[in-house]
């Protein structure tokens, strides 16, 4: 159970305390237990800390009492450690480890045994100095590293058991393994790992799938296994000849299928668990190294701990990875290279955040550091909104700073994926986002190649990508995000790892770039690999797929925080039909007639005007709210004015619910405008009416509708597109 909790990667190291319920009344605890939330197991643990019995918890939750008794036993053991410190004998420590306690959790509990309580225990367990030395002597260990050292000194290490995927009928081809702590009643610990004498490469997977870290990274991990093994199962061609070992805790991914890697360990992706696997594998054969680039942010966070333990990291160095993540270090590199980036700053308190935002000027883009998927990222238009963000969205502190950047309104965002071997660099793909900058790259539709950027802008982004890859010493994949505004290229972000765009680029150009990257990390050079073919005679469009329909009441407006749970690709000879195909793939059927509702912010009115004029010419009926209707009428468009919700009935939501609206273009600016139009987007979602919340996507939709009215969609295989034109 505790291994599963830390495998979630939500910051848990076991049954962490629920601060809000410490000292709560019985009624408050029962009320919390009655809510079926993702944190319910932690609430159960806290309920036992606060004195509730198994019978009382069962009466509320209806959880099987046997499981509740196991949780109760864990909480009781926590109390003993918090009172007496860590045991100093092997048998006592092995017993705690057999109950699932992580080294980190044991360190936190041990610190509490010397009177350091609450959140201070977590903080003190990470510090050093005289106080730390005194606490260490009293508690036995005060940090994860010290608990690990104590374990190793006492010879308390896990053994690995096999999951027999063949039910003992015959020998399993692919060993599935998991760690456990044996001893006591079980006799001497016995490991079934049986590491081979081969040269081996370990690939760290992406852990649990979630918004921001999904199957795209698992795709890369699989391709690494295929390219580095004896034979590539996809092509049947010889691989690099290494034994491939996958470490991942997610059973529902392809990387944990029986035929993906040579050996598989089902373990949480934490430093403790990964280091124990590597120690077991080092007992025989040669550990060539570990790949951390392919699993997203999860394995990247382990790179430094692995390097500190003497484990070779293949590909880009942990220092280069940290340089790209560390705001101050990266800014110095950008200045050295003479590149342009939006003004920005780092804040470790509310007052610092206010000062940085005032210096830059609103609107600003604010987000926590070291996150994936744009979690808690927001465009902030005023100090009032900034205060609300800090109060509700994030915890700002010295250890959890926030990053604040100038928001480039109406800029065009681009992604560049590149391969590098430490000497040479090649750009694999340049993608132009259809939505403007400020929409998370995972939520924005994009095209490969760019559909409207001039050649000189594309060339400049490629030049900067090459310069950055060489400066960082990238070996493998790298993703760079740019914004283009008023003919200038701004550097937004650099990720010296595989990005979520890799599968799209690979399918768009017809080349397995993740496999090439894996072979580079294993020592091969770009010049020895097939050349990248980038001049494709067609247009590929990636579109995001959203789960909004499954969550009644959710606002489907796009923002800097990623919301999509999947993606599709449309491909055709030109952009309009490729975009239409992508919309169909994402479940959005564009109408070829009917009534269109238009309500856009002032800065979008000139942008969207030509598209609305096209719809008018095609025979669509146009309805719009006051300001937009006045603008369109002045431009010669036939428009029917419709009330906003606040202006009284009948209003636009009534017409959406009545099925009168076939298509919606709705863009907002500012906090209040966003809130006022939420009911429009919610009604569209409920009524399955196609809607677009950015001007650029609205314009693209009109181009697609125009193409659909005059073109029959044709089906071609990807292989047909890859054939060179004659």
Image: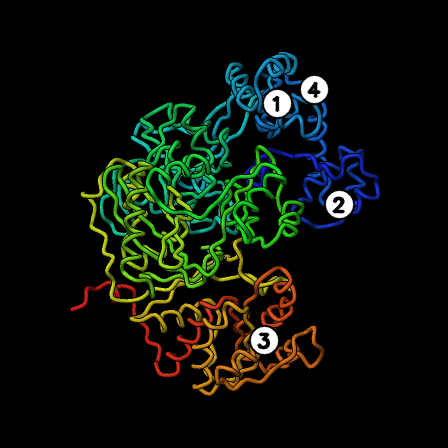
* Eye-nearest disc, 1 or 2: 2
User: For mark 2, what is the residue?
Assistant: 33
Cα distance in 3D space between marks 3 and 4: 66 Å
Label annotation for residue 95 = 1
Residue 465 in the image, given as x and y percentages of width and height:
31, 47
Q: Earlier in the sequence, mark 3 or mark 1?
A: 1
Instruction: Name above or below for residue 195 compared with residue 527.
Output: above
Q: Tell me the mark number nearer the camera, choosing from 4 and 1.
A: 4
Position of the C terminus, as image quadrant, is: bottom left
Labelled pair 3, 1 in contact (Cβ < 8 Å): no
Q: CA distance from mark 3 to mark 1?
A: 71 Å
Residue drawn 63% across the image and 77% down it: 652
Ranked by sequence position, the earlier of labels 3 and 4 is 4
Q: Is residue 443 left or right of residue 227?
A: right
**Of residues 174 and 426, which is closer to you in this image?**
426
Locate residue 322, reporting x and y percent: 42, 34
Question: Which residue is tagged 3?
Answer: 627
Q: Residues within 10 Å of mark 2 (few under 14, many from 20)?
A: many
Numbered badge on residue 113? 4
Q: Are marks 1 and 2 in contact (CB under 8 Å)?
A: no
Mark 4: few/some/many CA within 10 Å (<14, 14-19, 20+):
many
Residue at disc 3, secondary structure: helix
Q: Residue at x 49, y 56 (%)?
A: 438
Say which label, 4 or 1, has the lower sequence index: 1
């Amino acid at each position: 159970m505790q291994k599963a909790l830390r495998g979630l990667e939500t910051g848990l190291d076991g049954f962490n305390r629920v601060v809000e319920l410490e000292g709560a009344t019985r009624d408050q605890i029962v009320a919390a237990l009655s809510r079926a939330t993702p944190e319910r197991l932690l609430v159960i643990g806290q309920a036992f800390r606060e004195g509730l019995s198994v019978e009382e918890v069962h009466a509320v939750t209806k959880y099987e009492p046997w499981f509740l008794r196991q949780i109760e036993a864990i909480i009781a053991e926590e109390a003993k450690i918090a009172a007496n410190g860590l045991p100093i004998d092997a048998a006592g420590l092995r017993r705690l480890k057999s109950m699932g306690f992580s080294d980190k959790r044991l360190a936190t509990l041990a610190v509490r045994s010397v009177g350091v309580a609450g959140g201070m225990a977590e903080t003190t367990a990470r510090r050093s100095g005289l106080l730390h030395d005194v606490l260490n002597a009293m508690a036995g260990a005060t940090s994860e590293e010290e608990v690990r050292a104590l374990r190793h000194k006492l010879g308390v290490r896990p053994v690995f058991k096999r999951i027999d995927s063949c039910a003992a009928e015959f020998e399993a081809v692919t060993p599935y393994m998991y760690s456990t702590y044996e001893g006591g009643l079980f006799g001497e610990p016995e490991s079934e790992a049986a590491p081979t004498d081969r040269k081996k490469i370990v690939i760290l997977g992406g852990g649990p799938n979630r918004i921001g870290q999904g199957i795209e990274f698992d795709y890369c991990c699989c391709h690494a296994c295929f390219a580095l093994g004896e034979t590539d199962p996809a092509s049947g061609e010889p691989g690099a000849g290494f034994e491939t070992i996958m470490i991942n805790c997610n059973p529902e991914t392809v990387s944990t299928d029986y035929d993906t890697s040579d050996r598989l360990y089902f373990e949480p992706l934490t430093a403790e668990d990964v280091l124990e696997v590597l120690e077991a594998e080092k007992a025989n054969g040669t550990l060539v190294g570990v790949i951390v680039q392919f699993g997203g942010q999860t394995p990247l966070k382990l790179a430094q701990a692995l390097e500190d333990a003497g484990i070779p990291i293949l590909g880009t160095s942990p220092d280069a990875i940290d340089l790209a993540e560390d705001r101050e270090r990266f800014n110095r590199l950008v200045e050295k290279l003479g590149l342009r980036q939006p003004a920005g700053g780092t804040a470790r308190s509310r007052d610092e955040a206010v000062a940085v935002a005032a210096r830059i000027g609103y609107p600003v883009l604010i987000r926590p550091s070291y996150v994936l998927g744009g979690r808690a990222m927001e465009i902030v238009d005023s100090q009032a909104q900034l205060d609300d963000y800090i109060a509700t969205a994030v915890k700002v502190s010295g250890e959890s700073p926030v990053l604040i950047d100038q928001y480039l309104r109406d800029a065009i965002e681009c992604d560049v994926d590149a391969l590098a071997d430490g000497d040479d660099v090649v750009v694999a793909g340049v993608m132009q986002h259809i939505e403007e900058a400020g929409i998370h790259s995972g939520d924005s539709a994009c095209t490969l190649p760019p559909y409207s950027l001039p050649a000189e802008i594309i060339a400049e982004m490629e030049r900067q990508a090459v310069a950055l890859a060489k400066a960082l010493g990238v070996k493998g994949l790298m993703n760079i995000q740019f914004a283009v505004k008023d003919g200038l290229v701004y550097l937004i972000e650099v990720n010296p790892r595989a990005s979520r765009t890799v599968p799209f680029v690979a399918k768009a150009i017809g080349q397995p770039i993740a496999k090439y990257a894996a072979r580079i990390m294993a020592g091969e050079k770009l010049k020895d690999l097939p050349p990248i073919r980038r001049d494709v005679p067609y247009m590929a469009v990636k579109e995001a797929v959203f789960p909004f329909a499954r969550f009644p009441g959710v606002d489907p407006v796009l923002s800097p925080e990623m919301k999509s749970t999947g993606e599709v690709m449309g491909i055709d000879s030109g952009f309009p039909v490729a975009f239409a195909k992508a919309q169909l793939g994402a479940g959005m059927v564009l109408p070829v007639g009917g009534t269109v509702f238009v309500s856009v912010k002032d800065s979008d009115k000139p942008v969207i005007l030509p598209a609305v004029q096209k719809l008018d010419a095609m025979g669509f009926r146009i309805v719009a709210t006051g300001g937009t209707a006045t603008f369109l009428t002045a431009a010669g468009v036939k428009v029917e004015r419709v009330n906003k919700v606040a202006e009284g009935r009948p209003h636009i939501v009534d017409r959406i619910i009545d099925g009168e609206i076939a298509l919606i273009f709705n863009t907002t600016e500012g906090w209040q405008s966003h809130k006022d139009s939420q009911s429009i987007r919610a009604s569209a979602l409920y009524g399955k009416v196609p809607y677009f919340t950015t001007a650029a996507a609205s314009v693209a939709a009109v181009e697609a509708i125009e193409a659909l009215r005059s073109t029959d969609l044709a089906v071609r295989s990807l292989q047909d597109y890859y054939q060179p034109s004659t």
